[in-house]
Amino acid sequence: MNRNVIGIARLGLFLGFINIAFGQQHVANLNNLSIWSEKQKEGALVDWLVSEVKDTAAVYRNKESNEIILSNGLLSRTFRITPNSTTIGLKLLGNQQELIRAVKPEAVVNIDGFTINIGGLKGQPNLAFLYPDWIDGLEADPLSFKFSGFKIGKPEKRMEWKRVRHHAPDVQWPPKGVKLQMDYKMDNLLVEDILAMSQESRLGRKVMYFDDFSTLSPELRVRTSPINERSSFINEGKPGEIYTPNNSAVYAEYKLAPGVGLVETSIDLGTDLSGMWGPE
């Protein structure tokens, strides 16, 4: 079955006066988009493997015009676009399964040592799940690229593809469907803003040690509180994700090389409501 596909938001960034844009698109007006209806939200109840799905890939808006929705009748992706753009929904329409638990930046770029978020919203109180009632209260990061507009077009051939799928000789390249380009730009920054960014970056510093916790490094010495046997530096199979009850502690030690005078870390609080955490 030949299904239309969704081209999910390839970023067009405004870096100063430079616009990284793409062809075969037109600037879209939000009010010209069809409204995403409740009937569509209830979704594709047919089995697309055995029955024809008549919906094609398209871009919609909600009634309040503060969300953009991509859907092809099988799944949908929802972007809240005010006060900045972030993905708030990625749903399988057949069973209404929601795959998004936490809002994050749409991308992160590093420019001359400065780490800057593209889109995203802050203030979600618990990253394990996302209540719709929380979304209106989320705030934009003033030091991030802001959503400035969007364009709609058709998927483009990004590379030559030697077709070797003999079971699908009529497959089209590029595929049918729709492409959504979302544009972002940076507000004018004050000197104080740039200093705030530099303090959060590794600008001019030599990286002595880095760990993404894909595995638990043998160089780490893990300390767990004996109060509860469940205390662990690995949670649900994820190294570096700490689980421990109230009034207990879990931490890992790493012996720094001589001469290290600064440690910078990023910590995802998750559901941790305590006030005692961080590098020491």
Image: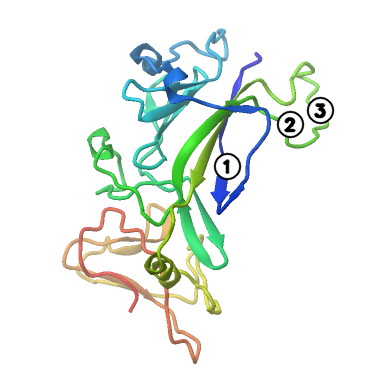
User: Residue, x 55% and y 48% (percent of image)?
Assistant: 14
**Above/below status of 248 relative to 72:** below
Q: Residue at x 82, y 28 (%)?
A: 164
**Residue 157, numbered circle:** 2
> Mark 1 or mark 2: which comes first in sequence?
1
Q: Is residue 124 visible?
A: yes
Q: Amino acid at mark 3?
A: Arg
- Label 1 neighbour load within 10 Å: few <14, some 14-19, many 20+: some
Asked whether, in this view, residue 227 is left or right of residue 80, the answer is left
Type of amino acid at the residue the image marks with label 1 = Gly
Q: Residue at x 56, y 46 (%)?
A: 13
Return the x and y of residue 73 as percentages of the image width and height.
Answer: 49, 17
| Residue 241 vertical placement versus 172 (above, below) | below
Query: Looking at the image, which is closer to me, 70 or 251?
Result: 70
Q: Earlier in the sequence, mark 2 or mark 3?
A: 2
Q: Is residue 37 above or below residue 10?
A: above
